[in-house]
Image (cartoon, rainbow, N blue to C red):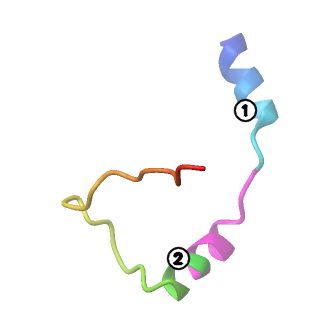
């Protein structure tokens, strides 16, 4: 429980409506379970 609380205390909350608008502005419309897993850019 302490680990979970520490993680949540360090988390930055998001505004769900703003995040949804950003996704939709990028042509997102639904979850695609056949899509390739997300890979962060290699720096």
In primary-sequence order, the first of circles 1 and 2 is 1
Residue at horizontal 25 percent and vertical 61 percent from the top: 35
Q: Between 23 and 9, which is closer to the camera in this rendering?
A: 23
Say left or right for 39 vs 17. Answer: left
Q: Between 23 and 42, which is closer to the camera in this rendering?
A: 42
Image quadrant for the N terminus? Answer: top right
Residue that carries the numbered disc 2 in the rendered image: 23
Residue at horizontal 62 percent and vertical 70 percent from the top: 19
Q: CA distance from mark 1 to mark 2?
A: 24 Å
Q: Is residue 15 magenta?
A: yes
Q: Residue most toward the top?
A: 2
Image vertical order of residue 2 relative to residue 25, above or below: above
Q: Which mark is residue 20?
A: none
Q: Residue most toward the front?
A: 43
Residue at horizontal 42 percent and vertical 79 percent from the top: 28
Q: Is residue 12 magenta?
A: no
Say left or right for 35 vs 18. Answer: left
Mark 2: few, some, or many residues within 10 Å (few <14, many ≥20)? few
Residue at horizontal 52 percent and vertical 76 percent from the top: 23
Image vertical order of residue 6 relative to residue 27, above or below: above
The magenta region covers 13-21
Residue that carries the numbered disc 1 in the rendered image: 8
Mark 1 or 2: the one toward you: 2
Mark 1: few, some, or many residues within 10 Å (few <14, many ≥20)? few
Label 2: state its secondary structure.
helix
Tell me where residue 6 sits by quadrant. top right
Q: Residue most toward the left?
A: 34
């Amino acid at each position: 429980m302490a680990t979970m609380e520490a993680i949540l205390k360090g988390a930055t909350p998001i505004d769900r409506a703003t995040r949804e608008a950003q996704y939709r502005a990028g042509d997102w419309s639904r979850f695609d379970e056949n899509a390739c897993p997300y890979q962060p850019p290699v720096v």
